[in-house]
Image: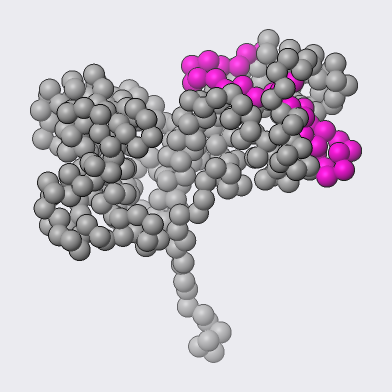
Amino acid sequence: MSVPDYQTLMLPVLELSASGELRIADAVDLLSDKFDLSDEDRQQRLPSGRQTTMSNRVHWAKTYLKQAGLVENTKRGFFKITKLGIGALAERPSRIDINYLLKFPAFRDFRERGSEVGGGDFLKDETITLQLPLTSELTPEDTIKAARDQINSQLALEFIDRLRSSKPAFFEQFVVQLLLAMGYGGTLAEAGRAIGRSGDNGVDGVIDQDTLGLDRVYVQAKRYAEDVTVGPAEIRDFFGSLDMHKATKGLFVTTSSFTKSAKETAERLGKRIVLIDGISFAQLMIRFNVGCRVEEVFEVKKIDEEFFE
């Protein structure tokens, strides 16, 4: 048979994980045997040539199961079933797909967050999956854009998860790399010496706004869990730190989010303080290619009218 789609693989992936911690690469091999794939099917690759189609679809199946809370990552390249996943298997479902996963609050929240990250409702449109059939509502160009947005949304959420589980210094380094990629002055070595100085009057780092260092941006970087929001007190503390440094500009970055009152406080204070939450930070990382790379490029071609004149 041909390589199954990623939704068809969701239940088999979950069943495999019930036996204990599993390496994702082993899951690909086991499922290739289960579906009796031919050598040709096993070797079939994405257009980029970087990954086999089967591996790509198993990874996506695992990713969606993880977002629903049915499996969890244990270490790099490994995952296992959760109590929620065990409960799902106990129901003996004949199939697990997107519609089935909607019964889990974590997955519904993931779809909502994905829609916010992507700036559209593509995750709410059941006609749009990674298999992307053409529909009367979508032009081919719209379909390609929706697929790109969906992939970028998942990438952004993975960024946030990774940064939240990293060490604070690692997150601070990412902030530096992003600012440099966005065109702020200085070098990575210079910025690295400035960032991460704990106890420096409430400022995590300083980065030049221009190459000559004529203007500077003071940075506060907070690696918080999703349920820990930044409130107005922390904004006022940062404002006080800027005042001590006689600074006029500040950047407050967090992997979580800011409360409404925190945003209002930043607007009222007499210094320019820019707030970047986890989603915005992830979007910027994707936009400026920090922590990610181009996997593949699709060319969309049109008739050259001049050629036929």
Colouring scheme applied when the structure was drawn: one colour
Q: Between 162 and 254, which is closer to the camera in this rendering?
A: 162
What secondary structure predominates along the stretch shown in magenta?
A: loop
State the image quarter where residue 256 is shown: top right
Q: Residue at x 48, y 16 (%)?
A: 227
Q: Is residue 231 magenta?
A: yes
Q: Quick check: 222 left or right of 122?
A: right
Q: Residue at x 58, y 30 (%)?
A: 170
- Counting from the top left corner in percent of width and height, residue 16 is at 18, 34
Q: Between 152 and 293, which is closer to the camera in this rendering?
A: 293
Q: Between 244 and 131, which is closer to the camera in this rendering?
A: 244
Q: Quick check: 56 left or right of 289?
A: left
Against 20, is 239 above or below?
above
Q: Quick check: 22 left or right of 222?
A: left
Q: Between 178 and 112, which is closer to the camera in this rendering?
A: 178
Q: Residue at x 29, y 55 (%)?
A: 53
- Counting from the top left corner in percent of width and height, residue 293 is at 51, 50
Query: Count of labels shown?
Result: 0
> Dividing the image into 4 quarters, which one contains the C terminus?
bottom right
Q: Is residue 217 magenta?
A: yes
Magenta residues, as a range? 203-232
- Counting from the top left corner in percent of width and height, residue 268 is at 76, 18
Q: Would residue 96 be visible to someone looking at this image?
A: no
Against 56, is 243 above or below?
above
